[in-house]
Amino acid sequence: MSEDSTAGLLVVDDDEGIRRQVKWAFDDFEVITCGDRPSALKALAKARPAVVLLDLGLPPDADGPSEGLAALGEILQRVPEAKIIVMTGQKERSYAVRAVGLGAYDFYEKPLDQEELSLIVRRALRLHELEAENRALLAGAGDHMVPGLLTANPALREVARQVAQLARTDVSVLIYGESGTGKELLSQGVHKLSRRAAGPYVAINCAAIPENLLESELFGHEKGAFTGAHKTTVGKIEQADGGTLMLDEIGDLPQALQGKLLRVLQEKSIERVGGRRAIPVDFRLVAATNRDLEAAIAEGAFREDLYYRIGEAVVTVPPLRQRPEDAILIAQRFLEAWSSEQGLANPGLAGDALAAITQYHWPGNVRELQSRIKRALACATGKITAADLDLPVGGEAAPLMTLKEARQEAERRVIQQALAQAEGNISEAARLLDISRPTLYQLLSEHGLRD
């Protein structure tokens, strides 16, 4: 075997009969067999096995776990990505549980059953392959120009390339995408990569502020302009002078304010509420929406002339369900960051969690993934499983919930259904749910569905 080649399976057991039996059972693998710890470590100098079958009762302590546990630690130190399955007798189960706590992937109780052992080994090998694929993806996931964006998806990489190119100009950018897909991150990328990066970045959500307050928030007001206006206030547009203004959910901007915004973009000046003086402003506009603005124009809900002003360049962010490779990368990045932030060891993701993350539809996109990982990290006692994430695995029934959890889950699903039926239109979803927009935004935050 050549230096640094990969052995599919390393078997470490002092029983020659078991070594022969395993080698025969896995004739489609490249198998290396060793009878003790020194020979196993010597084998690791020439190969990096994907899976290791390790007997805990190795000589010179064949009746105890000390030599096997020492081998476990040294193998993990040299080949940390290896999946180690420890083998024990029925009376030594406590040793096996201890080994799993020290980093073993799983344990198997002798005597050997070929079918059962084959299932465990092949599952371990598949997890090893998935993790290797993810490491390769992660190595190139940051190979683009938008700060903070993690993706291995070709479609989103193309969006990132477009954003980086557009940032060098001063055109207005309209970002389409479902709630939770990362539109704000791309908007910040436009600002950070532009000549205005040293200037302010000012963001406002047009759907989250009551209509009667939104005009003052955007344009500011003079002292005495209305009841309660005890002092002059600078609005978001004026605050963005010299930098970038991000108008999120611009599809929910009231029509009366659409005309005022258009005038600002045309004349490059504003008048505060209650004021008569034109104040020059110089800003770059980035807008985002989950609404179909062309349909809104056809319905008379959005001004066509404003659409062409805000959408000099248009980019669309694909939802997470269309980029499953990103779901695992993002989950691992979140897990790594939050574990470090909380001073905890990163527990990692179990094989069923990786599969569930890839298969799940993610109606709440990255925001939902973030919320599920946070909850799982707080509650998990070992590697994070699909159950910790409250995700289904292969159609299995979900674990029993408390009444409170069931109500929360039902509320979450109804909100998701309303958003889907309203095609992401917050105002329409709020109407379907018979609640106000601010209440809906509060619920979206509580359930980890808000962009």
Image: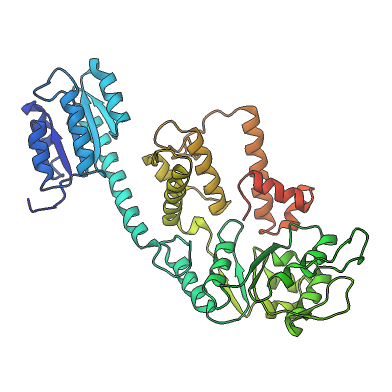
Q: Residue furthest front?
A: 231
Residue found 55% across the figure and 45% down from its top: 371
Residue found 25% across the figure and 43% down from its top: 80
Measuring from the top left, give residue 145's x and y in whole percent.
45, 70
Q: Is residue 155 above or below residue 79?
A: below
The answer to which of 389 and 27 lies nearer the viewer is: 389
Would you say residue 325 is visible in this rendering? yes
Q: Quadrant of residue 414?
A: top right
The figure's colour scheme reads rainbow
Q: Residue furthest bottom?
A: 267
**Left or right relative to 242: residue 32:** left
Q: Quadrant of residue 246?
A: bottom right
Q: Quadrant of residue 213?
A: bottom right
- Count the marks: 0
Q: Where does the C terminus fall, quadrant-wise? A: bottom right
**Left or right relative to 64: residue 415:** right
The answer to which of 358 and 44 lies nearer the viewer is: 44
Q: Residue furthest top?
A: 91
Q: Is residue 353 above or below residue 138?
A: above
The answer to which of 319 and 56 lies nearer the viewer is: 56
Would you say residue 390 is visible in this rendering? no
The answer to which of 197 and 35 lies nearer the viewer is: 197
**Left or right relative to 158: residue 35:** left
**Left or right relative to 93: residue 64:** left
Measuring from the top left, give residue 89's x and y in whole percent.
20, 19
Residue found 56% across the figure and 51% down from its top: 367
Measuring from the top left, give residue 257's x and y in whole percent.
81, 71
